Image (tube, rainbow, N blue to C red):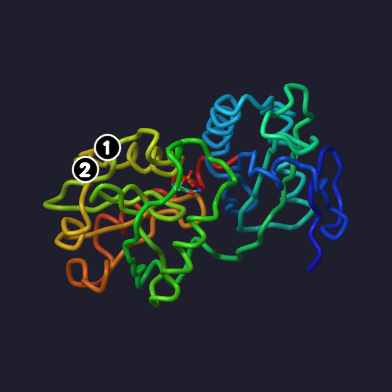
Amino acid sequence: MSRIVYVNGDYLPEGDAKVSVFDRGFLFADGVYEVTSVLNRKLVDFDGHTARLQRSLDALDIKAPVNRDELLQIHRQLVTRNQIEDGLVYLQITRGPADRDFVYPKDATPSLVIFTQSKPGFADSPQARTGWTIITVEDLRWGRRDIKTTQLLYPSMAKMMAKAAGADDAWLVEQGKITEGTSNNAYIVKNGVIITRELSNDILHGITRAAVLRMAVSAQMRIDERPFTPAEAQAADEAFITSASNFVMPVVEIDGEKIGDGTPGPVARRLREIYIDEGRRTAI
Ligand code: PMP
């Protein structure tokens, strides 16, 4: 399969889509990214992702190379050209090419790369019916996890540890409390209350998290934003994760311990349904 990829103003066959070896994204992971899901050829929560992108860029003092409307137009072009019915749009902005130096140049020209990934029918993933199994590992990431940087080596290592243990993902633990998953936000449900860590520099401010919590409030569900321990999670009635690429995914086992009866719980199933319905309805 050959995709069309957007690179700094051009739509190119993926084999021709290239950036400089001097790009600071390559040399320093000096860049940020966003992943937006596509359902029925439309973009879910596009404005949420654009707003967070701007916050990440501001935090790193990188100037946005295009505005919101241009970004939307590029996303739509790629969805059309690559015939994405369901899938993802991946966007990356780096500080751009410069001679290697820890001091970054104020006048670098940022690089913008955007590509699609086709995932036919991924909203009906069979995994959502069985749920994920999770292991916990120490959170060894840096301290500004609220900035969505491309510095993803530790999350990738943690995901590999999960795979090696026969699990689907890892939840990261810092000072005895779960921060989040390798690439998702983490939740438990106890006595009808949804518990998830509060926003801070310790976690990424998930766009799906914001939408799901808003929908939970509308559905009269109770929410407690606070850290929780792995032991508390193992004793919970339910657990789940949220992310743009997995929507709401039930978690049925943590460190070998079944959660509830070991099947996806009603709160996770309901929130998944509401989120996907609403996502389809409001996609642009
Ligand atoms: N936390 C981390 C560490 C992530 O990488 C992601 C997804 N990139 C999320 C949470 C979920 O964020 P979103 O709902 O915006 O996809």
Give residue 217's mark.
1
**Residue type marked 2:** Met
Point 34% across, 56% down: residue: 138
- Tell whether 161 sits left or right of 4: left
Closer to us: 164 or 195 = 164
Q: Quadrant of residue 66?
A: top right
Tell me the quarter of the image containing the C terminus.
Answer: top right
- Pick whichever, 190 or 45, lies toward us: 190
Could you tell me which quadrant the N terminus lies in? bottom right
Q: Quadrant of residue 75?
A: top right
Give the percent coordinates (x, y) of residue 8.
Answer: 82, 39
The answer to whether residue 155 is left or right of residue 30 is left
Residue 196, horizontal then vertical, whole percent: 27, 44
Quarter where residue 142 is shown = top left
Q: Residue at x 79, y 35 (%)?
A: 98
Label 1, secondary structure: give it: helix
Q: Are marks 2 and 1 in contact (CB under 8 Å)?
A: yes
Q: Give the camera-side residue of 19 and 35.
A: 19
Tell me, for residue 221, which label it has, or none: 2
Give neighbour class at mark 2: few <14, some 14-19, many 20+ (Cα, 10 Å): some
Name the residue at 22% across, 57% down. 230
For label 1, count other residues whose C-alpha is less than 10 Å away and answer few (under 14), some (14-19) or many (20+).
few
**Callout 1 amino acid:** Val
- Which residue sits at x=74%, y=29%? 65
